Image (cartoon, helix red, strand yellow):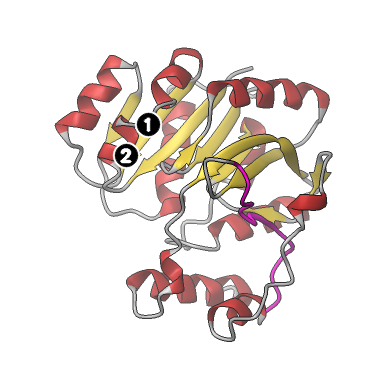
Amino acid sequence: MMIFLSIINHNHDKMLASNPYLAEIAKKYNVLIKSNTPVTEELLLFSQRNNITLIDKKYGRGFSENNNIVFDYLSKNNIINDDDFFLVINPDVLIDISQLIQLEKETHKVKSDIYTINLFKDSDLSIHEYSIKRFPRLTGPLQGLFLKEKRTDSYDKENICEPIEVDWAAGSFLMFKKKCYDELKGFNQKFFMYFEDVDVCRRAQKKGMVLTYLPNIKAIHKGAFNNRNIFSKHFIWYLRSYLRYHFNF
């Protein structure tokens, strides 16, 4: 069993090349970076030095399509097997190799089709990122964006000490069994950005697949949350995906 990491680079070259954990991870696991923007020499040299596969083509694609490109590359070249895992992980997620090794061990003890872990916003691992949620109601996300009300669809991580099944988890860290990703046909490429993670988890659940949250595996996510600014292009993408998810167009 092997874990393949799929990282989408969109002008994150310096961030990736300076990631204090990535080179060590690449010694044990297969790391693939799909660049959505032209690669700098810094990232090119970093990838070459650390035996990281760099897919430097097809720029300007959405999150869904980029990850599907990585998966297709692995499948068409017979690199990934049915017993392997395809890990979608954001470039701004910092995870120590010891946590990935522990994650690998957990997959033998806790059987699931998809896994996610405990993400934190800070290096002290004291501020939880509420990255696991129940499937959203139509008005749920708008409560936080416009009414500034507390979201009620997040699971309370502080009171979860054992692995549990959850509805959906953020695409910043989702690990699929290869067969699961195959059957789902990956992410829905109609979602350019946002809600593709909710959509894939909902489709998985409809097929009887299980998503498990592992609270003891921890990492840091330095997310930008650009969708919170209603004057940004990210908010426009968010709104389109929100409507597409709820009204299936």
Q: Is residue 233 above or below residue 208?
A: below
Numbered label attached to residue 19: 1
CB within 8 Å, label 1 to label 2: yes
Amino acid found under the numbered disc labelled 1: Asn
Q: Position of residue 114 (x, y in %)?
A: 69, 40
Q: Quadrant of residue 196?
A: bottom right
Q: Residue at x 33, y 17 (%)?
A: 50
Query: Which one is nearer the viewer's eye here, 98 or 54?
Result: 98
* Residue 20 is one of the magenta-drawn residues: no
Q: Main secondary structure of the magenta part?
A: loop
Numbered label attached to residue 48: none
Q: Please state the extent of the stretch shown in magenta in the rendering.
A: 125-138
Q: Is residue 210 above or below residue 79?
A: below
Name the image quarter holding the N terminus. top right
Numbered label attached to residue 15: 2
Q: Quadrant of residue 235?
A: bottom left
Q: Position of residue 97 (x, y in %)?
A: 54, 22
Query: Which one is nearer the viewer's eye here, 70 or 152?
Result: 152
* Residue 136 is one of the magenta-drawn residues: yes
